[in-house]
Image (tube, grey):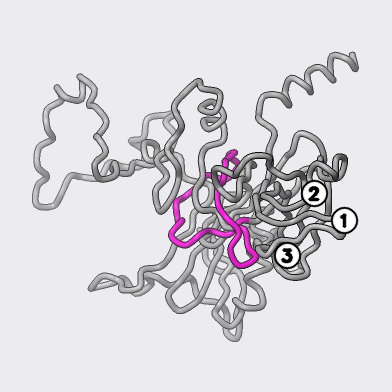
Amino acid sequence: MEEVREERKEKTGARHPAHQATLFLEGRLGEEGFHSPRLPRGLRAAVAGYALSQPEEHRGEGVFTLWPRTDEEGRLTEVQVALKLKRPMEGPELVVHGILLHADGRRFVVLVQPKSGEAFRLVLGRARGFTAFLEPRKAYRFEGALRGGRLLAERAFPLGKWVLARKGERPLPEPIEGDRNPHLEGRRGKEPAPGEAKPKERPEEAQRPAPAPPGPEGPPKPPKEARPPGERRPRRDPVRVWRAPEEPPDPAPPDLGRPPALGKGQVMGLAGTGPYYLVLLPQAVPDWWPRVERLLPELNRRYEVRFYPDGTRAVVAWDLEALKVWYKRVLRG
């Protein structure tokens, strides 16, 4: 029985490619250790892999493969020197394969599960202009670079599609970069990008007569009871980042771009009657927002992160009890 279980584990583990986090930098490896002008001063650089088991073949100057680690802000805290490349480097400076745990307007939190060794979290900052939406709990290949002592993601690919392309079984998928994720556009109802062909109409859709123009008062709204039994509501994204408009339309509703009010004297707390808000006024953001952001992956219900023009920030959830339990963790730190 135990042998059957072990065999099942091996087969299950072989379904997804081994994750990795690799940084390619020029430097010099000698008896005194590894040095590179690109690394922050005082950064710990350990020797591992082939550079440790076959030191004579990997000493000297060249481009080295490094295994990085970061803090919660994406700053490089440690590297392990694995080997020296025998051929000139081609491709991105940073490559990370892993599961996206959390994404917001500044960073990605990625779980890396290597073939051997323990899994670890890596935090990647967003490069300037990289604002595309990525789905949490999906596996991605991130490509980027080391800038100012921080690892920055510049583009991404769905990892499964990229691996199939690497094997020659399908074309290379379009990159997720800038503000566009081409792998979500069909499901999220976005218009195709400029120069992109629109999807073909189905025959029955082409033959369907155009709807009559609405009257002056518009079409009547169907009652809620008119939803057919068993029909589900449209799927919503598990995590979204929302920013209030800088200039509300005229005339604007009185509460547009504002979170629910807190009690008198409060600068942080729960508010709202559904959905429910954890509101941080600008005075509380410097001290509390880093902790809130660090613990967001532990909020195991659908939520949104909202930013307001006056500097207020909020976490919005639809499950009040889950939000209360998570908020207690934030207060405890």
Query: What residue do we see at 87% from left, 40% from top?
Result: 53
Depicted 229 relative to depicted 319: above or below: above
Among the 4 quarters of the image, the one containing residue 303: bottom right
Q: Amino acid at mark 1?
A: Glu
**How far across and how far down the image is residue 249, in percent?**
26, 70
- Mark 2, residue position: 59
Query: What residue do we see at 31% from left, 73% from top?
Result: 247
- Magenta segment: does it hold 149? yes
Q: Which residues are magenta?
A: 124-151
- Mark 1, residue position: 31
Disc 2, disc 1: CB below 8 Å? yes
- Mark 3, residue position: 328
Q: Quadrant of the N terminus?
A: top right
Sequence-wise first label, 3 or 2:
2
Label 2 vs label 1: CA separation?
8 Å
**Outermost residue, bottom direction?**
265
Near-viewer residue (129 or 213): 129
Label 3 vs label 2: CA separation?
51 Å
Q: Quadrant of the C terminus?
A: bottom right
